[in-house]
Amino acid sequence: MPAPRKVIVTCAVTGSIHTPSMSPHLPITPQEIADAAIGAAKAGASIVHLHARDPRDGSPTQDPALFGEFLPKIMQACDVVINITTGGAPTMPIEERLQPALRHAPEVASLNMGSMNFGLYPMLNRFKELKHPWERPYLEGSADRVFKNTFKDIEYILASCARNGTRFEIECYDIGHLYTAAHFLERRLIEPPLFIQGVFGLLGGIGAHPEDVSHMKRTADRLFGNQFLFSVLGAGRNQMPVATQSLLMGGNVRVGLEDSLWDGPGKLAESNAMQVKRIRSIIEAMSLEVATPDEARAMLKLKGR
């Protein structure tokens, strides 16, 4: 009897999409981020995807010093694969977004594959009472904001991180982003296996309908053949349905409070670990197994710790 298929589970711990007013469970301080990542790892996450926030008001920041406050704590407590964002927030220039990955040289860094509209403003219809002065302008401004990720930007990140041996979680918010990844693969600026992370259900990107997920996977299969691993994240209420579809298609999954604050209709998730446990239960119910961090390292050909 063949061994069960291993599934890489990424947990995105805090992110830049949601604001502190949206959930009391969103990790803000370096200690909260460290605790959340360690909890996710103990729950079974193979990889933790990490942003930082200003501990005074929860606003997104790419200050490498703040990353330096929680990264050692995570690495001392567990062997989870560290994945640092180069996306940061749509309001940041590319040089600022790159600094934490450049300074800390993680095994994995995220890399967005294209410029796009990034609409967060509809959240104001649900969250009307906001705690901090930055939150409303940040959300309102997304109606007239382009998240800039040009070919030059992408090449800059790839070239800057090449010396560090960092590999990439290649974030694809639409079908054209797969073709951009294929372009850089053809130029040998990225090396297989590609870790393709399909992002579904954010306003401005591809939707979260099952046909959208299938189309992303079919296109990636055609472009990359056996040179990639497919993973998905579904925004908001789409998180678990999209993840389950990926499992059915032979793919991997990403969960976490960056992508969704919820643990069911109207019920806030109290921790990242809660979402990891939920997807783990689905994985195991399908007679699959969660990949350990070392198994994920082997699957993705990472440099190791």
Image (cartoon, rainbow, N blue to C red):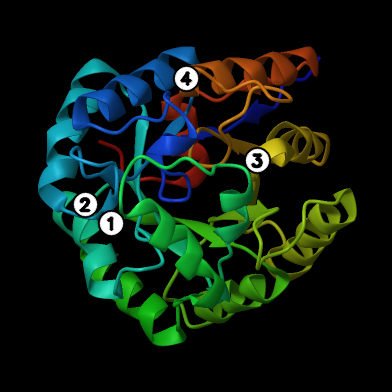
Q: Residues within 10 Å of mark 4 (few under 14, many from 20)?
A: many
The answer to whether mark 4 and mark 3 are in CB contact below 8 A is no
Structural distance between the alpha carbons of marks 2 and 1 = 8 Å
Structural distance between the alpha carbons of marks 3 and 1 = 33 Å
Q: Is residue 18 left or right of residue 85?
A: right
Q: Amino acid at mark 1?
A: Gly
Taking depth in this image into account, of 273 and 305 the one nearest to the observer is: 273
Q: Position of residue 300 (x, y in %)?
A: 49, 45
Q: Mark number for residue 105?
A: 2
Q: Is residue 239 left or right of residue 146?
A: right
Q: Residue at the spot x=55%, y=42% of the render?
A: 127
Q: Which residue is mark 3?
A: 236
Q: Which residue is mark 1?
A: 165
Structural distance between the alpha carbons of marks 2 and 4 = 27 Å
The answer to whether mark 3 and mark 2 are in CB contact below 8 A is no
Q: Secondary structure at mark 4?
A: loop
Q: Amino acid at mark 3?
A: Gly
Q: Secondary structure at mark 1?
A: loop
Structural distance between the alpha carbons of marks 4 and 3 = 15 Å
Q: Mark number for residue 271?
A: 4
Structural distance between the alpha carbons of marks 1 and 4 = 31 Å
Q: Residue at the spot x=18%, y=24% of the render?
A: 73
Q: Which is in the foreground here, disc 2 or disc 4? A: 4
Q: Earlier in the sequence, mark 2 or mark 1?
A: 2
Q: Amino acid at mark 2?
A: Ala
Q: Residues within 10 Å of mark 3 (few under 14, many from 20)?
A: some
Q: Mark number for residue 140?
A: none
